[in-house]
Image (tube, rainbow, N blue to C red):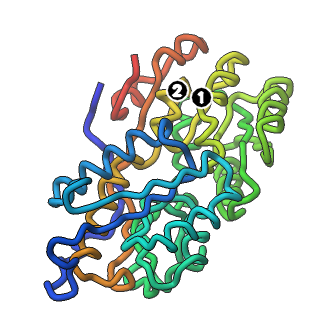
Amino acid sequence: MKRRAWIGIGVCGLLARPLAGAAQPAGKKARIGFLSNLNPELLAPSVAAFRQGMRELGWVEGQNIEIEYRWADGNLDRHPALAAELVKLPVDVIVTAGPQAVLAAREATGTIPIVVALMPDPVALGVAATLAKPGGNVTGLTNIFEELTPKQLQIFKETMPRAKRIDMLSDPSLATAVQAVTEAAASALALKAQVFQIHDVAELDAAIQAAKAERADGLHVLPSPFFNRHRRHIAEAATRLALPTISEAREYVQDGGLMSYGPSFPGMYHQAASYVDRILKGAKPGDLPIQRPTKFELVVNLRTAKALGIAIPQGVLLRADELIQ
């Protein structure tokens, strides 16, 4: 069931189209490098959204663009080599997402434009001077997770007002700022928070088992490409142990998680196409403001709620953008 989306604070009126002059030469196919943390199956909706965005702007694979795909398939150590492959081809633009991939691409080239569909605070990451004028060769979209995860906890507490404890799955390879802010938000909501630092699937399974043994009221899955890759595994294990989950993206809920609140990943990839379009027409990435998402989705899996014996409050149901039956 689709409902009216929540609108978050965003940067508006951005990205005026550049003047012609430095545009892609007529008759030459533009070559786009696509570097992903995941694999084609997991990222299929986002790839489709990006390609659709490009088609809407007049860029069609096989006609005036070629896309070179490189997939890390969850192995983040592969990013430098994959980014180097794209630079060597060479490509005209690199499209990517996630902090590790962004940093690998930025390390591989300081000249080829890099369009990021999703990244944490780019200033803190060290790839942009400011959001309004990033400078350098990196631009795109940011989802500042420090502002998002506290809202996820609020929704969890509203859904389960008697909850006293929530255990958090955290990726130690990412910045600790998100974890600190989220723990503070949990304390403000009178939720005791236990944080599990996860390096691999074995630790993931152990953490979920520990959360159940310690009588946690739920699991908060913090942002991470690793968790995204294993989202179905997390959902199945948590549901089997009667642990409700909340996370950042609807894909988690589609795969059996209870709730998510965050931007649409496919929507951000669709929006990234507009950056590629402008760069191929001559814009400099350092002059294109980095945007925050303007649309956020609250998604609830009613099948999972039923399996867990949870009655979703009416207020949450009415605000939901999608209810998975």
Residue holding disc 1: 232
Residue 213 percent across, percent down from the top left? 85, 24
Say if 241 sits above or below 66 in the image: above
Q: Secondary structure at mark 1?
A: helix
Quarter of the view holding residue 11? bottom left
Q: Do labels 1 and 2 touch, CB within 8 Å?
A: yes
The CA span between labels 1 and 2 is: 5 Å
Residue name at image x 26 percent, y 61 percent: 65
Residue name at image x 52 percent, y 44 percent: 248
Does residue 230 appear left or right of residue 167 in this picture?
left
Q: Amino acid at mark 1?
A: Arg
Placement of the N terminus among the 4 image quadrants: top left
Residue 204 percent across, percent down from the top left? 77, 36
The answer to which of 308 and 126 lies nearer the viewer is 126
Q: Secondary structure at mark 2?
A: loop
Callout 2 crowding tier (Cα within 10 Å): few <14, some 14–19, many ≥20: some
Does residue 171 appear left or right of residue 132 in this picture?
right
How many labels, in total?
Answer: 2
Residue holding disc 2: 255
Does residue 41 appear left or right of residue 163 in this picture?
left
Residue name at image x 69 percent, y 60 percent: 174
Say if 155 sits above or below 216 in the image: below
Say if 101 sits above or below 111 in the image: above
Which numbered dot is residue 41?
none
Residue 108 percent across, percent down from the top left? 58, 76
Q: Amino acid at mark 2?
A: Asp
Say if 66 sits above or below 295 in the image: below
Does residue 238 appear left or right of residue 139 in this picture?
right
Q: Does residue 195 appear anywhere in the picture? A: no
Residue name at image x 33 percent, y 79 percent: 288
